[in-house]
Amino acid sequence: MSKKRILSGVQPTGNLHIGNYLGAIRNWVEMQPQYDNFFCVVDLHAITVPHNPEVLAKDTYTIASLYLACGIDLQYSTIFVQSHVSSHSELAWLLNCTTPLNWLERMIQFKEKAIKQGENVSVGLLDYPILMAADILLYDADQVPVGEDQKQHLELTRDIAIRFNDKFASEENPVFKIPEPLIKKEGARVMSLSDGTKKMSKSDPSELSRISLLDSPEMIKKKIKKCKTDPVMGLSFDPQRPECNNLLTLYSIFSNQTKEKVALECADMGWGKFKPLLTEATIEGLTPIQEKYEEIMREKGYLDTVLKEGKEKAEMVANATLKRVKSALGFLV
């Protein structure tokens, strides 16, 4: 029996942080031997908001390198750059023409980001869930690793695929496979260091809100020392104490201990004793990733080869799907 296929990706908008790693990439690494994996650097998504053209290519290399440094194994996985496979853009247009506008207008993330951007909001920001659907559907993905905040987008992808199959295919020969979400709860939602009620994000203007995978030990120590806490003595996994809950969860993951063991260890601690423990565990957890990243970046030719081979593998699958779609829509193919 062939392995089920997984598709996921990360935007090249600066360095990845521990939320990206613990909520997504670490899970990819652990489960990759069980699946046929396609992991892309979604650079087309990166320009749906104002971006810096001078660093886009550099950031794309950084993300691809971090995939490898975090443990994505080419024996099990294909790494490629989204814009290198033109089928993504072409299928997005075809899906634009078969998806009701009001399905996009109800998307929560668009509403939130549109408020922030005001008059600068682009059509791409409204439309990027369609591109995300194209990303997933091109590869006949069985499952998509998503956080809780991305579930609505995957539900939209499923709705788009079901609608397309109903209108342009038969039940016996559907054009699209209907993907399922793959959600791992542990560490799936890492919160900001400056506000435990908000998800850690690369778009947060404060660098102190997140720990990046490539932060130096000194920077990690500084950020943890300055992170927001509460005045309660004794630490516990309490939903009513969001910062405490978040920091204990991070310590549990980086120290490779159960929550029960961490709860016992930290029950009588104050922040002054706990923060050095979290700092040490975080630095120890990120050091192997940073060392591997530096090794990969010194061999740019190797990374170019990985992305070239990844593009070729991705194109074979994506182009076959695109041909099915165009045929179903009545194009001459």
Image: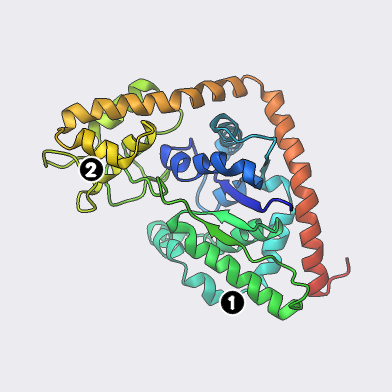
Circle 2: element type: helix
Mark 2, other Cα within 10 Å: few <14 / some 14–19 / many ≥20: many
Secondary-structure class at tag 1:
loop
Instruction: Tell me the amino acid under the disc marked 1.
Output: Pro
> Hey, which residue is sitting farthest right in the picture?
332
Name the quadrant containing residue 112: bottom left
In the image, residue 2 lies at what x, y percent?
73, 52
Q: Is residue 174 above or below residue 184?
A: below
In the depicted view, which residue is nearer to us: 56 or 293? 293
Alpha carbons under labels 2 and 1: distance apart: 43 Å
Residue linked to disc 2 = 244
| Residue for badge 1 | 100
Residue 17's spot in the image, x, y percent? 43, 37
Residue at the image position 55 percent from the left and 48 percent from the top: 46
Picture quarter containing residue 180? bottom right
Residue at 56% x, 75% y is 101
The percent position of residue 183, horizontal first and vertical second, equals: 48, 54
Judge whether residue 327 can be spotted in this image.
yes
